[in-house]
Image: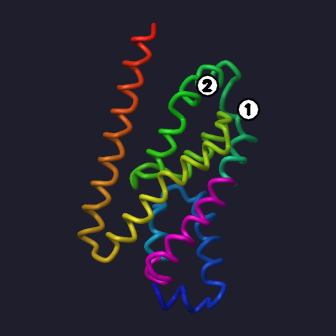
């Protein structure tokens, strides 16, 4: 993989970013795979940085496409019902989808745009999830067995933390009412 990517020379990182953007439309393609390619080709930190740049661009494109498509998928009434969830749990949902290797990173960009999640909060949540995932995948990618186990741990811990967050928030809201 390293030799293949490096054959592009200085265009290699740009090719990897373009690949990450195109991967957004290939929902069945795992979004963590470009992290491994970047790390193998450019080293731990450069691979992570290239990936984060690509994810930022892809997420932005997905977000704004979602904003344009909202009327095709949801009625105004449905959008209003979802507003509570996006307002209260959107940030955590984006982090969970970004940090978990089992959820669609790409779909969450479209959904955040459809439901008009604040763009700055969306991008902050994107990086809050992608930075730890990128570091973990880069670390675990040295060994396939370790990578598989690491992915399960990352996804599991992310899901448990998110469930705890929703539970605690629900209890706080109940107390207020």
Location of residue 171 (image quadrant) = top left
Percent of width and height locating residue 105: 51, 52
Q: Residue at x 52, y 77 (%)?
A: 46
- In the image, which residues are magenta? 39-60
Q: Earlier in the sequence, mark 1 or mark 2?
A: 1
Q: Residue 83, labelled with which disc?
A: 2
Closer-to-camera residue (130/173):
173
Q: Residue at x 36, y 46 (%)?
A: 158
Location of residue 15 (image quadrant) = bottom right
Residue 104's place in the image compared with 32, above or below, is above
Q: CA distance from mark 1 to mark 2?
A: 15 Å
Percent of width and height locating residue 84: 57, 23
Q: Are marks 1 and 2 in contact (CB under 8 Å)?
A: no
User: What residue is disc 1 on?
Assistant: 71
Residue 5 belongs to the span the image colors magenta: no
Residue 54's place in the image compared with 168, above or below, is below
SS type, badge 1: helix
The image quadrant where one finds the N terminus is: bottom left
The image quadrant where one finds the C terminus is: top left
Location of residue 121 (image quadrant) = top right
Percent of width and height locating residue 16: 59, 75
Q: In screen coordinates, is 118 left or right of 45?
A: right
Residue 16's place in the image compared with 5, above or below, is above
Tell which residue pokes out farthest to the top in this image.
177
Q: Residue at x 60, y 44 (%)?
A: 122
Q: Residue at x 28, y 64 (%)?
A: 148
SS type, badge 2: helix
Residue 57 belongs to the span the image colors magenta: yes
Q: Residue 136, labelled with which disc?
A: none
User: How many numbered marks appear?
Assistant: 2
Q: In screen coordinates, is 69 left or right of 33?
A: right
């Amino acid at each position: 993989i390293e030799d293949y990517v490096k054959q592009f020379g200085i265009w290699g990182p740009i090719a990897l970013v373009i690949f990450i953007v195109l991967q957004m439309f290939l929902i069945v393609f795992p979004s963590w795979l470009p992290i491994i390619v970047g790390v193998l080709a450019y080293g731990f930190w450069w691979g992570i940085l290239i990936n984060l740049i690509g994810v930022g661009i892809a997420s932005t494109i997905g977000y704004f496409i979602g904003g344009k498509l909202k009327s095709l998928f949801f009625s105004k009434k449905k959008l209003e019902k979802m507003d509570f969830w996006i307002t209260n749990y959107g940030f955590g949902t984006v982090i969970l989808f970004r940090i978990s290797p089992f959820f669609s990173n790409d779909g969450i960009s479209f959904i955040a745009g459809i439901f008009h999640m604040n763009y700055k909060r969306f991008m902050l949540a994107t990086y809050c999830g992608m930075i730890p995932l990128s570091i973990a995948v880069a670390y675990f990618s040295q060994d396939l067995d370790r990578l598989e186990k690491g992915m399960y741990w990352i996804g599991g811990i992310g899901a448990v933390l998110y469930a705890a967050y929703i539970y605690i928030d629900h209890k706080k809201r109940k107390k207020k009412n």
